[in-house]
Amino acid sequence: MRNTVIAALIASAFVTLNAHAIDLVQVYKEALANDAVYASARATLSAGEERITQGRAGLLPTLGLGGSYNRTNSDVSFPTGSTNRSSDSTGYTLSLSQPLFRWANWEQYQQGKLSVAASEAQFAQAQQDLIVRVSQAYFDVLSAQDALASVQAQKIAITEQLASAKRNFEVGTATITDTHEAQARFDLAVAQEFAASNDLEIKRTTLEQIIGKPAGELAALRPGLKLTPPQPAGVDSWVASAQTQNYGVIGQQLAREIAQREISKNRAGHSPTVDLVASRSYNKQTGATLTLPTGYTANSNAIGVQWNIPLFSGFAVTSKVREAIALEEKARADLENARRTAIQGARQSYLGVTSGLAQVRALEAAEISSQSALESNRLGYQVGVRINIDVLNAQQQLFVTRRDLAKARYDTLMNGLKLKSAAGTLKEEDLVQVNTLLRP
């Protein structure tokens, strides 16, 4: 009766625990709100979006208003005597300048549009990176939990085997060697349990760093789930997508275009500039001066075209052009490196998925075989045809196989997400699809 009550309490606690477990999508939503790296990327996008307004400003008119006020006192001496004269003068000028031809300003405007597109590509990459980072941290915690549970289960099994070895030694049906072997395995399991517990705490801390708070219990993978191969099935399709749709590649393509515009912008230092200028001035003076016995009011309007031809600037323009050409060459090399990195990432992730699926199938078969081997060794130990070390080895093989199987599933899922990220197609919907593989 007592054992039944304990089993019921454990089952109830397990159900309650899973009822409060959060899944992958919930953790991702927490990361969207709290991850510092993602918040930095969002702020960078907002700052980058202002580049187009700043670039357009060089093509729009500028309007300025200036003014002055002066008071003058003068002591004047004449043969007939001296006199004091004072006057007040007030004036303002409203000026307008509209660029008609400024090639550097046009190139700066085009660079602004490209910079906005580059900021959007960087933010899209940050979104994909967040999905990968959250998923990796999530599955790392699950993997660490599985490793700890495996060690704890193995320790319980070794404890039972140790007790059996001691009983058999006391009745004379086994040697002290069986007891020593079981004790050594038990001590090793205790040490492994400490290490696994520490590793789990580190993995939880990593996830907490992303979401900004403790994650609590996480929903685990459904038992017996079947993983599907990537679609399309050929690696060439993923590589082709990585070369054109990878956000790192897109960002470097835009950076190269910006560098090319920078060359043209600096070459414009040798080009003439033409502006339309207009102004309206108002001046008023009250009182008398030496030249004007009375005050006056004057209004003037002016409109015209102003041009300027740069002749020599100490070789500064030529030097800036050479610098821009070198930076454009650097951007071209960075683009090629981004392409190669994307291709390599797509190939590695694709191979990771395909080999992971094969490894999962092999470990599933190995789990069944290991379970059968353990049962056979236990039966053989009971009838005396197997020794204690055989049972311990069979137990260890089963638990290690189960741990490796769980990790192979996590790695396969992660390689699937990384494959889509390398191809530039990773979306939140892909995370939702992975989330369906977890226990509800």
Image (cartoon, helix red, strand yellow):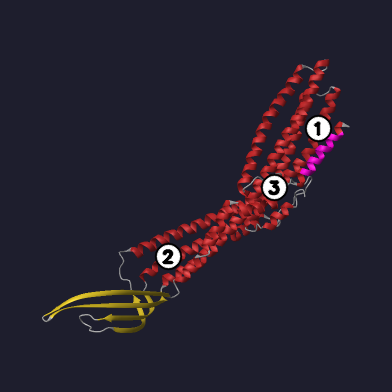
Residue annotated with mark 2: 263
Residue 75: image quadrant is bottom left
Disc marking residue 412 = 3
Circle 1 SS class: helix
Q: Is residue 224 left or right of residue 101?
A: right
Marks 3,2: beta carbons within 8 A: no
Q: Is residue 411 left or right of residue 292?
A: right
Q: Is residue 124 left or right of residue 6?
A: left
Marks 1,3: beta carbons within 8 A: no
Disc marking residue 373 = 1
Q: Is residue 10 magenta?
A: yes
The first of marks 1 and 3 along the sequence is 1
Q: Is residue 423 magenta?
A: no
Distance between the Cα atoms at labels 1 and 3?
Answer: 27 Å
Circle 3 SS class: helix
Q: Which amino acid type corresponds to the residue marked 2 in the rendered image?
A: Ile
